[in-house]
Image: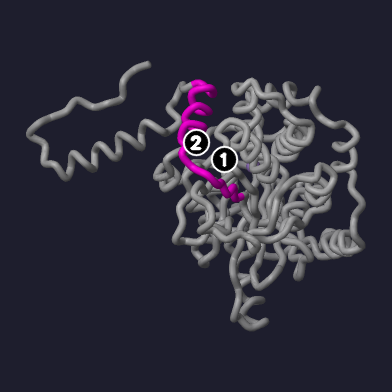
Amino acid sequence: MKSTTPMRQPEEPPKSRARRLVRAARMALYARPGEGVREKLDRLVQYAKSHQRALILTHDNPDPDSIAAGVALAYLLEKLAGVEAIVAYGGIVGRSENRALVKVLKLPVIPVARVEFDEYDLICMVDTQPEQGNHSLPARHFPDVVIDHHPERPDSHLAPIADVGGPIGATSTLLAEYFRASGLKVPPHVATALFYGIKADTRDLGRQTTRQDVDAYLWLFPMVDKDALGEIEHPKLPEDYFALQHTAIERAQVFEDAVVCDLAEIYAPDMVAEVAERFMYLEGMRWSLAFGEYDDAIFYSVRTSDRRMNAGRLIRDVIEAKGGSAGGHGSMAGARLPVKGLSTVARRRLRDQIVKDFLDAFGVKTRRPRKLV
Ligand SMILES: [Mn+2]
């Protein structure tokens, strides 16, 4: 292995030297380009070993990828580093498939409200990053470990262990690679969760998928509990689901090649993603935007079929300007905008303004929509 210790220069002032050494020490823990998975895993395990209790945080209103990555990381930390680990999420597990994932596989995940942060000496974050704003880590804490396939945010590298960014389609793929490198047997519940995490995030390997995602998917497949997977992918749905679909179809508006759907109140925040996703199936659409209110916040979800566009950057430009938090990749992105304290009229006005901002960003000229039905 090549040494990363810089040459010592005696004339250097002690303060800047200290700073440089701290930086070098941190650098030594980063995932380096070309570094093997085994080395990454070894550094993670080595670091975790000097800790007792790990808290693994997913993003708020977690999707299958973040739940699976969290559960897999907890398992690895317990087996390889002897660290007791729990997985927690902010918000709710809303979508029926995601509820089924947790229930059918009996995944050990808990709401963050039940977590006493100070009881943990190793804080990990999966499928999100400190600056992403879509997680429930209190500002006084900073994660030790960040594992996420979303575009890298600068602060993530302040974490001692950071495996972030890259074109990879799912955080679950990174965790599957850790498992593979570890030589550990993947228990069926973890294999099934990771498999479904990759499947859901890449939409059956059809979106933002790399060779690594395909390899992980194929590697996991024989270990997947097929009956459980069937129950997860085809869950029973609450009446609310059908009411929401009805509302969605009734309220969808078409602006040239963009479909926009104001869902008003939603029963679960992640339903905006489901609706935005669904309307991308509409012929001739290049953009799909769905939004709705839940618990004093407006949730937004954007999809695009235009490979030249970056939905993640676009949604950040629109929503962060209004004081919300946003993130995503090239073709899919989401955001949350707090509206607590705003009157109904003010909320209405804000929603309308944001739709205009999105239409501008989409490059749509018309402001006169037609109703879908
Ligand atoms: Mn993901």
Q: Are marks 2 and 1 in contact (CB under 8 Å)?
A: yes
> Ligand 1 near label 2 (Cβ, under 8 Å)?
no
Q: Nearer the viewer, residue 351 or 18?
A: 18
Task: Point out the quarter of the image occupied by ligand 1.
Answer: top right
Q: Nearer the viewer, residue 276 or 187?
A: 187
Assign the C terminus to one quadrant of the image.
bottom right
Q: Nearer the viewer, residue 66 or 225?
A: 225
Q: Which mark is residue 83?
A: 1
Question: Residue 179, how many percent across, how many down?
Answer: 64, 27
Indicate whether 159 appears above or below 46. below
Task: Specify whether residue 368 is in view.
Answer: yes
Q: At 65% across and 48% down in the image, what residue appears?
A: 87
Question: Residue 266, how many percent across, how many down?
Answer: 77, 66
* Part of the protein shown in magenta: 36-57
- Tell me which amino acid carries mark 2: Lys
Query: Badge 2 is on which residue?
Result: 49
Question: Does label 2 or label 1 sit earlier along the sequence?
Answer: 2
Residues at marks 2 and 1, CA–CA distance in whole angstroms = 7 Å
Secondary structure of the residue carrying tag 2 is: helix
